[in-house]
Amino acid sequence: MFQFNQLSQNIIYTTFTTFMKVKSPLLYLLFFTVSLNTSIVVNARVKLPSLFTNNMVLQQKSDVAIWGWAQEAANVSVVTSWDNKHYNTKTDSKGNWKLKVNTPAAGGPYNITISDGSAVVLKNVLIGEVWLCSGQSNMEMPMKGYNGQPVLGSNMAILKSKNKNIRLFTVAHSGKTEPQQDVAGTWEEASPETVANFSATGYYFARLLNETLGVPIGMINTSFGGSSIETWMTPSSLQPFDNVKIPKKGESISLYRSPAVLYNGMLAPIAGYGIKGSLWYQGEGNYDKPDEYEKLFPAMVKEWRSLWNIGDFPFYYAQIAPYNYTIFTPGNWATKYNSAYLRDAQRKALQTIPNSGMAVLLDIGEENLIHPANKEAGGTRLAYLALAKTYGLKGFGAASPSVDSITVKGSTAILTFKDAANGLTSFGKPISHFEIAGFDKKFYPAKAAINKAVVSVSAPEVKEPVAVRYAFKDFVVGDLFSTEGLPVSSFRTDDW
C-alpha cells in the first residue's frame, strides 16, 4: 500500500478536484497515473542530516564525507559547484548512503546538489577550517553568559561579531542509550544574535583563527553542562573500566552522568563530518577521580580519532581552572578532592596523547564560581596552540612553560622549564606557591628565584629536597608565567 506524505496529498487533491470537473474515463486514468508518480517522486526525495544544510562549512583540501538517506537501492548523485564534479553512489538495503567529495582551498560560497531523482540544493556553502568543540558547562557557556554569571567583555564582542566567514553549529542536548543517526541544530552565520548563544570559548577560538588565517571557520559545538567524561565515550572504549556501568535500552539515565549517553545522542550522529581538529574543555565533572581520569582521557581521545578515521587529528584542551571544590563535598573532605590532582592528570596527558596541547588557565579561576568569566583567555590560548602546532605559525608564544627536569644541589632544588625561550617571569610580584619536601614527604612553603628559564626552590626546614610542588591547591591564582603571559601549570615532581 502506498504511503503519501502531506505534500503528495495536497498535489493529489488539487489534481483530483480539477479532473472531477471534466467527466472522462481517460482523464480519470491519467489522474491516477500522475498522482502515483507524483507521490513516488516526492517520497523519494533524498534526506540529509542536519549537519548538511545551507551555510555549512566543509574542511578545505580534504576528502570529506557526505551522507544521508533515500529509498532502498536508489541511485544518489552529488554535484559540487566548485569543480562541477559528479559523484555517484547507491543506497543500501536500509536506504543509507555515504560518499566522499574532494574540497579545494578555502573559498566560496558554493552550492552542492544532491539528488536521487529529486534534487536538494545546499546553498551558501563555504570551504575553510572546521573545528569540533566539546565538554561540559565551561565549553557550553555562551557568549552572553549564564544567568547572573557574565563573560567579561562579551557585550562588545557580540556587537562586533557579524562575519559571514564564521559559521556556527550547536548540537542540541540529547542523551540516549543507543547511537542516533541525527542531531538537532543548524548552521548559522556569525551575527550578534547567533554569537550571543554560542560557546564563548569556541567563538573566541574561531575569531582569532579567522583573523589570523584569513579563511572561513566552521565551529561545531557539542557540549553538555555537568557531564562526566564517561558520557562522551563509546561503550567499547569503556569496557576496560570495571566500575563503569553502561545503561541498557529502556533503563532510566542521567543525561550528564550515565556513561555513553551523550556519545550516543550528541557525538555518534556527527562522527565522520570533515574536521581539522577538536577542542575539549571538561574535567570538573571528574575532579574527585583523578587517577581514573588519567586513563579515561587518553582512551576517549583514541576512540574519537578512530571514529573519524582521519589519523591523529589535533586535539587541544583547556586545563580546568582552580576553584573551591570543597563546597561540593561538605563534611566529606578527602585529599584527592583537591582539584590539583585532576589538573595534574590533564598535564600528564600531554605525554600520552599524540598531537595534543593544553591551554593552562591557572590565572583566571574564581574561588566561588566554577565558570571563570574570562572566557577569552581560554579561547585565545587554544587558538595559539592551533596556530602554532597545526598551522605552523612562528614568532609568538603558544604553549605554557612546563617542567623539563629537576636536580638537587645541597638544600636547593633546581627546576628547568621548556617552552620558555624568553625566560620566566612573575611580572614583579612575589612567587608564593612553591612547596618543597624531603624524604619524610612533608611539604613546606618554599622560596623561589627565577633565572631565565630556571627556578631555584628551597626552604629552611628541608635540608635534603626530594620533591617540589607548585600551586598544587584546590583554588589558587598562578604567579609564574612565560614572558608572553602564558601561565605555568600547577605541577608536582612526586607521585605521592
Image (cartoon, rainbow, N blue to C red):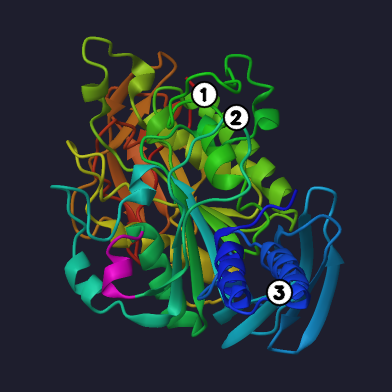
The residue under label 2 is 295
Q: For the view shown, which residue lies furthest in the left direction?
A: 148
Q: CA distance from mark 3 to mark 1?
A: 55 Å
Q: Is residue 201 visible?
A: yes
Q: Secondary structure at mark 3?
A: loop
In the displayed structure, does residue 475 sit left or right of residue 175?
Answer: left
10 Å neighbourhood of mark 2: few (<14), some, or many (≥20)? some
Please identify, in this view, whether the residue under mark 3 or under mark 2 is nearer the observer. Answer: 3
322 to 494, vertically: above or below: below
Q: For the view shown, which residue lies furthest in the top direction?
A: 331
The residue lying toward the viewer, choosing from 213 and 75, is: 75
Query: Residue 211 location, x and y as percent?
Result: 42, 81
Please identify, in this view, whether the residue under mark 3 or under mark 1 is nearer the observer. Answer: 3
Query: Residue 197 location, x and y as percent?
Result: 30, 60
Upstream in sequence: badge 3 or badge 1: 3
* Amino acid beneath label 3: Ser
* Amino acid beneath label 2: Lys
In the displayed structure, does residue 87 sit left or right of residue 4?
Answer: right
The residue under label 1 is 291
Question: Is residue 193 inside the magenta stretch?
Answer: yes
Q: Which mark is residue 118?
A: 3
10 Å neighbourhood of mark 1: few (<14), some, or many (≥20)? some
Query: Which of the 4 quarters of the picture holds residue 322?
Result: top left
Query: Residue 71 location, x and y as percent?
Result: 77, 57
Q: Secondary structure at mark 1?
A: helix
Question: Is residue 103 inside the magenta stretch?
Answer: no
Q: Magenta part of the protein: which range?
A: 191-198
Q: Are marks 2 and 1 in contact (CB under 8 Å)?
A: yes
Q: Which mark is residue 165?
A: none
252 to 346, vertically: above or below: above
Query: Residue 45 location, x and y as percent?
Result: 68, 66
